[in-house]
Structures are given as structure tokens and as C-alpha cells.
Image (tube, rainbow, N blue to C red):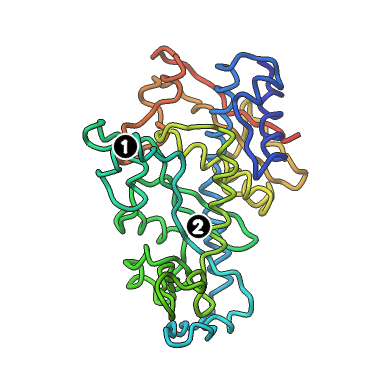
Amino acid sequence: MPQWVIGWVINESILRSPGVLTATDIQKSLGITYNSALRLKRRVQIFASEHISNVKDLMTAELKHRFHRIKRLRQKNPENINDNIVKHLKNKPVPQADTVVLYSAKNAGNRGRKRHHGQTSSIYLSDSLGGRQVGTLVNTFGWKGGPALYDSVPNQQAVTLLPLLERYVPKHTPLFTDEGFKWYKPYNRNHRMVNHNLAARRGTGKSRRRWQQNGVHTQVAEGKNGALKTAFRAYRYIRPEYSQLYLNEYSFFDALKYYGVEKISVGTAAAVQTAPQGRKPRSVDGKGGVLILITNTEHTLPITNRPRVLPRPWCAPIDLEHHAGKQNHTRAEAVREFEIL
């Protein structure tokens, strides 16, 4: 298969973002078999996963610069929900976090979802049906007009989500969530929550102001969740153990439009000083930025000893080469670079 094919896939993924390019789309456009199209898709997902750490660093640095002089936010006033406690931020986009479920199990086929409570009840089958995970729970982090990060998580417990927030949110940076993140309050003095179960003042039921109180809301995170669900409908279904690959790909191409190739490629270009045969990495945008797809190290290693993808805590690590039908033998592949056409 010619090398320009991977460039076409990357370019088409950029053009379709925030939509997605499925393996079936690649198969029909290039006239190749589905297995070949799926291998191309996996290569692009690994390509995006290798650069997503640079995106996380850029987002953290941007938040740190934006709120480096922020004072302590006032507490919410439950007696006056119209009192805006964030007006002194002068319309600075505040990051928000929320969770969303993709490909949930049907209630009728899960015997009432008796195994778990909350959103996890829709991603795990009941014990009588094996208790395996069939859906994907995603933690969303982003701000208005900016990129977003998506992490596949097994639950909404503090031990699971706290390391993610500590990685993304600088110290005492304002963060808006719903009350599912109550445990985060001691770790960030500027963490504010919106009560989605706010009771109505008159009669019974929920208040129509349950979506926003005192200027605090999670509408941006909800909007990004909606865009994610709309895009992932094209896949019909993805297995949970591969979910982080798909989420990294979706987040990377969204961030690529926001930051550009030059900024995202800084970390990668520093890590790889020269290309094969002693050639210097070429710029893909004419400004010195280089995006490099590392298919393997330059050493000869058994596939079983190579770094594995998706070391998720609730499932075994997955070697994509092994699952693609490759034999467990030694081989060497060079570090390659591809232009974004």
C-alpha cells in the first residue's frame, strides 16, 4: 500500500472533524478490503494517541496563563440564584467537566440494570448475564470555543477521576461541574457546582433554573457531550477496550484545528531529532512543525515486548498487531513521517 494513503486518511479526518472517518468510509473511498481499511484506521488512532499528550500540555498551559491572577470565587448564594459570582472573570471561558455514556446496554436486556447505580448501570451487564462491560463511560473536559479531552473511565469515583483533573486543571483554576463531583471541592477552592436537581419553589418537581445558578453551569460540557454522541453514531458500536483510541483520535483532530500543527508538534520534534538515514524531519506546514507517525522503534523487538495500547485498569492490555493477526516474530520498522496534504 503506498505511503500517500495514510496522508489521505489524516487529511480526510481533519476535514471531517468534528465528524469522524470510519473504516467503512476508507474502504469505499480507496477501494480496499475492510481489514486493510481498519489497519489504516488503527494507525491513525495510534498516531493521534502519540500526540495527545502535547495537546494536554497545551491546554494546561493555556489555563494556567488565563487564570494565573484569579482571586477566590465567592460561594454560591442559594437564596438568590440570580447573583452572578463569576462576573469579575470578564467573560474568560471557564473549563467544565462532565460524564457521558456511549453505547449503553438496554434496560430490557439487562434485567433492570440491578448491578450498578447511576450512569454505570447502563454500561455493565448484570451479574446473571456475566457482568461484563458493554458500554463506554466518558469523562469530558473542555471550555467554550476550545478543544476538549475525552477519557474512557470505568466509573465516576474520585479515585478514578481525580488523577485526570489534577493533570488537566492547574491549582485553584475555576472549574464548573455538576454535583457528581462533590468530592473535588477540597482539592480546588474555585470549584463550583450546579444543582441539576434544584426543586421548584412552588409546587412539586424540578425548577426551570436547575441548569444554571449564580452564573455556574455545565452547558459547554453538555454541548461537547452531544457533539461526541452525534459523531460516534457513525461507528454504530465500538468495544470498550478500544474506546480510548477512538476518543484520542476525536480529541486530537479537534485540537489540531484549534492549536495548529506547529504548536502540537513541538514536543514530538524535540523527542525525535532526526529522521531515518540521517535526514532532518521535514515541516508539514512550512513553519517548522513536524507530526511524526511512529509505527515501531528502530530496534528489533518481539511484538510482545513492545509498548502496548490501552493499559486500562478494568481490562487486559491489548496489542493491536497481535489482534490484527500478526505472528509473534521479530521485525524492525523505521520511524516515518507523513505530510498532511
290 vs 53, left or right, is right
Closer to the eye: label 2 or 1: 1
The amino acid type found where label 1 is placed reads: Asn
Residue at 68% x, 22% y is: 3
- The Cα–Cα distance between marks 2 and 1, rounded to whole angstroms, is 30 Å
141 vs 153, left or right, is right
x and y, in percent, of residue 45 in the image:
55, 34
Sequence-wise, which precedes: disc 2 or disc 1? Answer: 1
228 shown above or below 331: below
List the residue tagged with mark 1. 110
Q: Which mark is residue 177?
A: none
x and y, in percent, of residue 75 in the image:
42, 83
Number of other residues with Cα within 10 Å of mark 2, as a class: few under 14, some 14 to 19, many 20 or more: many
x and y, in percent, of residue 227 in the image:
59, 49
x and y, in percent, of residue 74 in the image:
46, 85
146 vs 180, left or right, is right
The amino acid type found where label 2 is placed reads: Phe
List the residue tagged with mark 2. 141
285 shown above or below 316: below
